[in-house]
Image (cartoon, coloured by chain):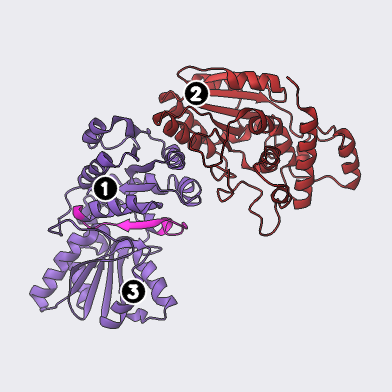
Chain colours: A red, B purple
Amino acid sequence: MSDFKTARDFGRFKIIEITRAAKAAHLASALSCYDMIYYLYNHYMKINAIDDPKRDRFILSKGHAAAALYVSMYQASLLSAEELNSFGSIGSILEEHPSPKLNGIETASGSLGHGLAVAVGMALANKNKNIKNNNIVLMGDGEQNEGSVWEAALFASANSLDNLTGIIDYNKWQATDRSNEVLALNPLSSKWESFGWQSLEINGHDLNAFRDALNFKATGKPKIIVSHTIKGKGISFMEDDNNWHYRLPNEEEMLVIARELNQ
Amino acid sequence: MRNAFAKEVTELAKDNTKIVLLAGDIGNRLFDRFKEQSPQRFYNCGIAEAAMTGIAAGMATAGYTPITYTITPFNTLRCLEQIKLDICYPNLPVTIVGTGAGLSYAGLGATHHSLDDIGVMRTLPNLQILVPGDAIEVSACLRAAVESGRPTYIRLGKKGEPIIHDKDFTYKIGRVIPIKSGARHLIISVGNMLGESMVAVEKAKDKYGLDTEIVSMGSVYPLDKKFLKNAFNKFERILIVEEHGFVGGAGSAVLEYAYEEKLDTKKLTSIACAKSFLSGVGSQENARRKLGLDSDSILAKLTI
């Protein structure tokens, strides 16, 4: 499989451009999970129409990475260039956290710990209706702090929701500190196993590994993909530097970024 | 009221296959008939109200009409942000049912009292708030909520409240429910205070020959503005009786409306609970007496 490098370089540059134009935060958070969201929208999920009841469903539960979602949707022709470029501007429906008022957004996210339960509800409903779709939710590692994540996790395994896939963007950082130091996150994969989920651990920037994990059939139980990622992935001076949770690049840094991303 | 809820939700779910009932590990045997009739549409979500609320929202986005059910404080304040963001923000057809509101569970202590739910829920955009006064009103409100296809909170008492209506009726959300017409004085009874308010009205007639009008409020949001506007013209005194704190409660909602419309707020009397954590109140009956919510206290306010 091609690793879609050209498309991903373009997408990363777009994320940085629109985030910078909007003077928005969370650039590094978006770059961390962008590869997976790009792959989901452009090479994996089946969305014939955004209101098709049989569509695959995706929730970006770590809503602060909205720029990665919008760029991926744009690349999948679910958003126009004009819409994408309006990100964060006055009157735009593309806010810094996804709004349910935007077509194609399945639920409001931004307050952490909400997305999994909503995805569980979708998976349960679709299972009852015998709709054979994928119900996918991407969470942050910091988001695993929220108790509501674990409430929903227990319900999903109790109800054998094998049409539900959780993804954790495990970049080892939360807003102000290392995610394994703030709370006792490790061992994350076996925590999910002990909650009754099938757990798979991959490099979240390796799209072949991601594809295989998505295709893995976990019979009778929900599946979690613990994806090891790098915050700020793709830009040499941003990678694993948590300052870019809030910072934006200046003109000089933009020249380096353009060069590194072949733009 | 809770038995009426169980009966009505079972009836509704018979024909309406979109209805799913999500319960927070409560109602032992209460939903046996529902489970027997629609086993694929009942879920015990465990003691996990935040998840239950999010799951309801997810099911609603996939075409279901979910109803969540547990004890009032746990189905409102405990999962407030899920109600706000998962249900109200996308304006989804989920009905949140809180049982044992107010001082229904007086003896269980302050953890189980709910004297703040209306006030808190009233701050959420898109959320209808219904306060049925007896078992018949419970059925009517539930049907109206499901029919509306909008986020709705229904505040129930417990079981065994006196039945005031003699027959079933169709409820229109945003309207008061007329009980008995009268002159000079009006009582707006909120939810489970209807029985007590009725006794006060009867005592007022027997003791003082007063012909008091009484309505069951039915809906705190939206308010029946037309009725209220007329009421401020027609009556000398308007009493709002609620087993809820004054701050943010139904009386406060009417006061806000009267203020906006520059109506004569001097006509208003709120009979509500003081802001405190109650302890040692024992029964609901005793708690009402202590807080001035019993029929004699209502009567006293009516005849001042």
**Extent of the magenta region:** B119-136
Dots 3, 1 in contact, CB < 8 A: no
Q: Considering the numbered disc 2 on the image, is that residue within a helix, a strand or a loop? A: loop
Q: Considering the numbered disc 3 on the image, is that residue within a helix, a strand or a loop? A: helix
Q: Which residue is disc 2 drawn over?
A: A222
Asked whether B180 falls inside the magenta stretch, the response is: no
Amino acid type of disc 2? Answer: Pro
Query: Closest to the observer: B130 or A12?
Result: A12
Residue B62 appears in the figure: yes
Graded by Cα atoms within 10 Å as few (under 14), some (14 to 19) or many (20 or more), the crowding at tag 3 reads few
Query: In the image, which disc is placed on residue B105?
Result: 1
Q: Mark 2 belongs to which subunit?
A: A
Query: Closest to the observer: B277 or B244?
Result: B244
Q: In which quadrant is the C terminus of chain B drawn?
A: bottom left
Task: Provide residue B255's location: percent of width, then percent of height.
Answer: 38, 72
Query: In the image, which disc is placed on residue B226?
Result: 3
Q: Is residue B273 above or below residue B110?
A: below
Q: Mark 1 belongs to which subunit?
A: B
Q: Nearer the viewer, mark 2 or mark 1?
A: 2
